[in-house]
Each structure stands twice: as structure tokens, then as C-alpha cells.
Amino acid sequence: MLLDHKNAHYDEINVEAVAGARQDMIQRSGRTSVPQIFINELHIGGCDDLFALEQQGKLDQLLAD
């Protein structure tokens, strides 16, 4: 919802439906839980991490880059 509110374009990948997607996510993030959020190639973390960036005033800059 936060990304929608900011009109950010994003791709949602269903790691249960796309072959190899879960393994790719684990390799890229080092985490097994979903969601794992990436902005460009930067691993943000999960939902709590995304909201923390918003509270710190850092999310808009990441989305603008």
C-alpha cells in the first residue's frame, strides 16, 4: 500500500508460482521470509524495513534514484 500511495512502479514476484524465484530471492537477500523488497538492486528488507525507511525520511530519495 505504501508503494501504491507513492505511485511507485514495482514488480511483484510470486515466489511460490515462479520457478526458481524463491531461490533467487534467498540468494539476493540472504533471507527466506516474504516479502523481500528491492529498490533497483538494493535490498531493503521486509515490510517493516520499508516503513522504517519511510519514517526516517529516506524512502522517497531511494525511489527517485
Image (cartoon, rainbow, N blue to C red):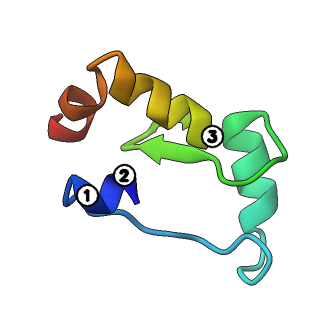
Residue extending farthest to the top is 56
Q: Which residue is mark 3?
A: 46
Residue extending farthest to the left is 64
Q: Which residue is mark 1?
A: 5
The residue lying toward the viewer, choosing from 22 and 12, is 12
Q: CA distance from mark 3 to mark 2?
A: 13 Å
**Mark 2 closeness class: few <14, some 14–19, many ≥20 residues within 10 Å:** few
The three-letter code of the residue at mark 1 reads His
Is there CB contact under 8 Å for labels 2 and 1? yes
Circle nearer the N terminus (3, 1)? 1
Which numbered mark, 3 or 1, is in the foreground of this view? 1
Looking at the rendered structure, the secondary structure element under dot 2 is helix
Q: Is residue 25 above or below residue 13?
A: above
Quarter of the image for the N terminus: give it: bottom left
Residue at left offset 49%, top offset 44%:
38
The three-letter code of the residue at mark 2 reads Leu
Residue 55 horizontal side relative to residue 65, left or right: right
